Amino acid sequence: MKRTSLLLALAPLLMAGGCTRTLEYDICVYGGTSSGVIAAYSAAMQGKTVVVVEPGHRAGGLSTGGLGQTDIGNKQAVEGLSLDFYRRVGAHYGELEKWIFEPHVALDIFNDYIERGGVEMLYGHRILRADKQGTRIESIRLQNTDRCFGLGRTVVRAKQYIDCSYEGDLMARAGVSYVVGREDNVTYGETWNGVQMRHLHQFPDGVDPYVIEGDSTSGLLWGISDGTLAAKGSGDDKVQAYNFRICLTDNGQNSIPIARPADYDSTRYELLVRLIEASGNHNLYSYIILSHMPNRKTDINNNGGFSTDMIGMNHSYPEASYRERERIFDEHMSYTLGLLYFIGHDARVPEKMRSEMLRWGLPKDEYTDTGHWTPQLYIRESRRMVGEYVATQADCENRTTVEDGVGMAAYTMDSHNCQRIVIHKDGRAMVKNEGDVQIGIGSPYPVSYRSITPRREECTNLLVPVCLSASHIAYGSIRMEPVFMVLGQSAAKAAALAIDGNTDVQAIDVTEIQRMYDEDPLLDGTAPDILVDDTDVEAAAGSGWQRVKIYGGYGPSLYRLEKAAGKQTLRYPFTVKRDGRYDIYTYYSKRGGMSKLSEVTVCNGTDTNRITLDYDAITIHGQTSGEWISLGQYDLRADTPAWVEFDNGGQVTGTLYADAVLVVPER
């Protein structure tokens, strides 16, 4: 009787769940990541109807999911609406731009893009299949996970599709070629792909891998695989480790203590104890990277040989079923909360580390609908498309330069560890991590439009700006949130061009995308910034200023003046196209040996303003070593030459640097 009554009560829900609705749009974006929101807003600003299909219930992906310490590399790579996002974050905190931020602040900004663009969001929907006619996707079939027993079905028909998911699920179901794992170095003539055992985020020699030290019959400690070390540079299907970017707070009024997980198992963390004993290091922040966010919050990331990365536990994730992915997510969350609890409570952890850990708790005002824990796992790498062009190490090192760039990348070639194994050295068994690579690149480099387009024989109305076409090691340089946002905007522009021209995405005029960033980067008619850098600069005759490449500046290079006699000047000229009031900035990066003061003169075409910059008074925030420093507001007239000039005031007591100048219209 009870069973019959339950079925009768559920009948309306089951009937509703069994219905299929069909929706039609110009552009369908799959994945409400930061890239997905920017792509959708960009499409809407071009007059296209657009929907975002998001399997979860939160927009913004990692940018709202705890990654507040933005990975940039060089700010030159950030433009268009991606830069607008960081400007909006800056406005919230009273600055020009801000690259470190709280999760809810980012969420509010992404939700504002959605509202202003009139973008329709389908939360709680995930793709089941893609239906194609020849090389065109005609529709995608979705499962509504919020309906009773997951039986709700939705079909979305669109002219163009953009896969902005971290997993590439639409791309895969559309029959587009992709790879998972690491290529052999010989595949693309690389040196940093494939198996790599290096010194960073590593165990010191001698850490025993066995449950009973020295006894191989006792089995391996948790977290160590029974794999063997393959040849350096050889390829495999292993995926670099995932983790959570953790937002905690030490504000007692806003903090919830980290509780012991229900499935807590302290033996999972035995390797951490052995690592602490082997290193003798009792500093908590040698085992986690704790980056301070505004309002006493954190972005915590992996650090060292044993940390928040759950090494080797994610290899099946890219191709896993939705249920299996949920299991992997839950295991990562349990491991991470257990790790934080272990550090704070286990007597084997040094008291100094325990007391420091107990300062931190979950923030009451973040992730209020998911138990104050982020719903976004850091999917550092999943599927990677094999498209019209594969970006490789040669692109990262400026040995190859494409002409069809629709975004720039600037980060180190970066991979987290892929496996934790046993090696034998000097007759001893010891645990080692394998897969971590951190190798610098050349100058910021362009990402080819062909890297976000599938092969034309496979699909002609799909763009893939996140799981784009790149080798494992090149993807490690490209895969940063600001770049994903730029590529999302480029993909939306390309999709609109393909619709307007009734053509394939592979056939659009890429120069139209490039022109967008020069002429209408925000897609709303707002006057673009004016940037003066490098080759635009005018040095006085006989000047001692030299153009040099130094990490930490803006763009590929900057100017340096060594100690020199007499006044030495360097001028950054510019003109504006519209009368108005403008904010003028120069880029400053702290370096050892720099002169304490710099003399700067700003000319608006008629009047000059002499400024002395005191570098000691400047604070640099975030990952990069530089910031835009205000030189004030000025009234500028169209087509009237203006300039910013640096000089040494007649003498230099140390080394003096001058970098880019930025002119921003008042908005």
Image (cartoon, rainbow, N blue to C red):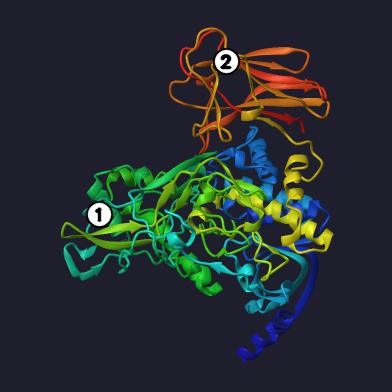
Please report the residue visible at 79 percent of the width from the left and 36 percent of the height from the top: 527
* Amino acid at the residue labelled 2: Ser
Q: Which mark is residue 274?
A: 1
Residue 18: x %, y % from top left: 71, 82
Q: Label 2: few (<14), some or many (≥20) within 10 Å?
A: some
Position of the N terminus, as image quadrant, is: bottom right
Q: Secondary structure at mark 2?
A: loop
Q: Please tell me whether residue 134 is drawn above or below residue 64 in the rendered image.
A: below
Residue 375: x %, y % from top left: 55, 59
Among the 4 quarters of the image, the one containing residue 450: bottom right
Among the 4 quarters of the image, the one containing residue 667: top right
In front: label 2 or label 1: 2
Q: How far is the residue under mark 2 from the one under mark 1?
A: 58 Å
Please report the residue visible at 23 percent of the width from the left and 55 percent of the height from the top: 207
Residue 263: x %, y % from top left: 39, 67
Q: Mark 2 highlights which residue? A: 543
Among the 4 quarters of the image, the one containing residue 311: bottom left
Residue 172: x %, y % from top left: 60, 71
* Amino acid at the residue labelled 1: Arg
**Earlier-in-chain disc, 2 versus 1:** 1
Q: Secondary structure at mark 1?
A: helix
